Amino acid sequence: MNVDIDWTPEQRVYRERFLAFGREVVQPGGLTRDQTGAFDADLWRAVGESGLLGITTPTEFGGDGKGVLEFAAAMEGFAEGGLDASIVFSVLVQVAMVIEPLLQVGTPAQKARWLPVLASGQRKAAFAVTEPHGGSDVFEARTTLRIGNDDELLLSGSKWSVTDAPYADMAIVLGRVEGLGASGLSMFLVDLAGPTVEREGPFDLMGCRAAPTGALRFTNHPVDPEHGVLGKLGDGVPLTRLAFNMERLLAANVGVGFLQAVLDHAVTNLSRNESFGRPLQSYQYVQGRFVEIRKHLEFHRLLTRRALWLAHTKQRFNLEASLAKLSGAQALHDAALHAVLLLGNRGYRRDLFPFERLCRDAVGLMIAGGSEEVQKMAIWAELHGENRS
Ligand SMILES: Cc1cc2nc3c(=O)[nH]c(=O)nc-3n(C[C@H](O)[C@H](O)[C@H](O)COP(=O)(O)OP(=O)(O)OC[C@H]3O[C@@H](n4cnc5c(N)ncnc54)[C@H](O)[C@@H]3O)c2cc1C
């Protein structure tokens, strides 16, 4: 057997670079961003300038031209160093849900227009599928594209709970083409400028508060007739799955970085405490919590690396991505809660440690990109050979 799940030297360089960036640039403002619940445009600019968003974008469009493993290694370090799920969410939306579909099915003109500004962070992207009537049944989208009198394409409808919707410059939007029924479900590349888009938000979230969600309301909003459809008309289902699979894979992957940080911080901080005349770490009940965090980390890393390997080698990874996302969000929540409890009253304080924030953020991971039940439905479908589109 030949098993090596470690990063290559080049991938390790990416990991270390963004671990340092996370520690220096992201971590210091995490508490303030959580308290204000606002998207930090300066931080976003710094992330763009760091090159993180362009790792998978070809060099001709200003990126590094690397693959999913290099990006995953960078994101693992970024999560571990920054300890901020909000900015991680914003980055994942931009790269996994918008840049990746563009890379896979975008036309040369679409790539030329969007990749340079998205990979550099000059433009913020959103991925809008959820609607006010419910997000799990995502293919019941009511947002509709109709052909106007002068052959213009006009989008109408509402999207809801969309990450960074209050600030985004563009969005990939799921909608149906009027008159085509279910077969008309399609993805549109939408410039969000202009009076025909109304925004609501930021919504006051429990966690991931600095990547605020919001609503987008389109009223006969013009979609570029030449370059506004991603893939072909009717590709809405496979393109939604493509984006969700990528998001699930990479959201699971950042869990490894977060879990590593939780473990390291908990060990470092607890080692200073004593109780009943002995170091806390000498008590088996206390050791048990560390074992639980370590167990979550090791299991989750193995599962995620396998999913990443399948993606890297162009094999189907839907099942593994859903499994990793499902278990990773739960693992992160449980590990962060262990860390809170290990540190007692100090762990419960927001101003001292980021663990209570991570507990709340992990709940966002349990919902966004498909709830726990939806992941289970996807896993079941994979096991039974459904969802083969
Ligand atoms: C932090 C955050 C960021 C988000 N970002 C985005 C984004 O960028 N773009 C976007 O489009 N959306 C986004 N969402 C929305 C997210 O995708 C939806 O919240 C999610 O898909 C669930 O949809 P819903 O909230 O409407 O819940 P509902 O679909 O109303 O479901 C409510 C509950 O019922 C369960 N349920 C539903 N149907 C079934 C079933 N058949 N069997 C069993 N249980 C079921 C669900 O699992 C859930 O527990 C985000 C959400 C959060 C929390």
Image (cartoon, grey):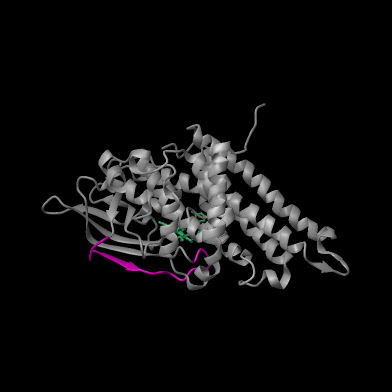
Q: Is residue 342 left or right of residue 363?
A: right
Question: Residue 16: x, y in percent?
Answer: 57, 47
Q: Is residue 252 visible?
A: no
Task: Name above or below for residue 63 compared with residue 282.
Answer: above
- Between 183 and 367, the one lying in front of the other is 367
Magenta portion: prevailing SS class: loop
Q: What is the x, y in percent for residue 32?
A: 52, 71
Q: Residue farthest to the left? A: 150
**Residue at left offset 51%, top offset 63%:** 208
- What residue lies at 47% left-to-right and 53% top-to-bottom? 369
Q: Verify whether residue 29 appears in magenta.
A: no
Residue 203 magenta-drawn?
Answer: yes
Examine the rendered structure and indicate whether residue 337 appears above or below residue 231. Answer: below
In the visual, does 158 lie left or right of 277? left
Up the image or down, 101 lies above or below 345; here it is above
Q: Looking at the image, which is closer to me, 162 or 286?
A: 286
- Locate the N terminus and report the quarter of the image it occupies: top right
Q: Is residue 12 left or right of residue 165?
A: right
Q: Which residue is depicted at the point 55% across and 62% down?
A: 27
Which residue sits at x=79%, y=67%? 273
63 and 2: which one is in front? Answer: 63
- Out of 52 and 196, give the one closest to the viewer: 52
Which residues, given as a range, are shown in magenta? Answer: 193-209
Q: Most extreme residue toward the right, as rendered? A: 277
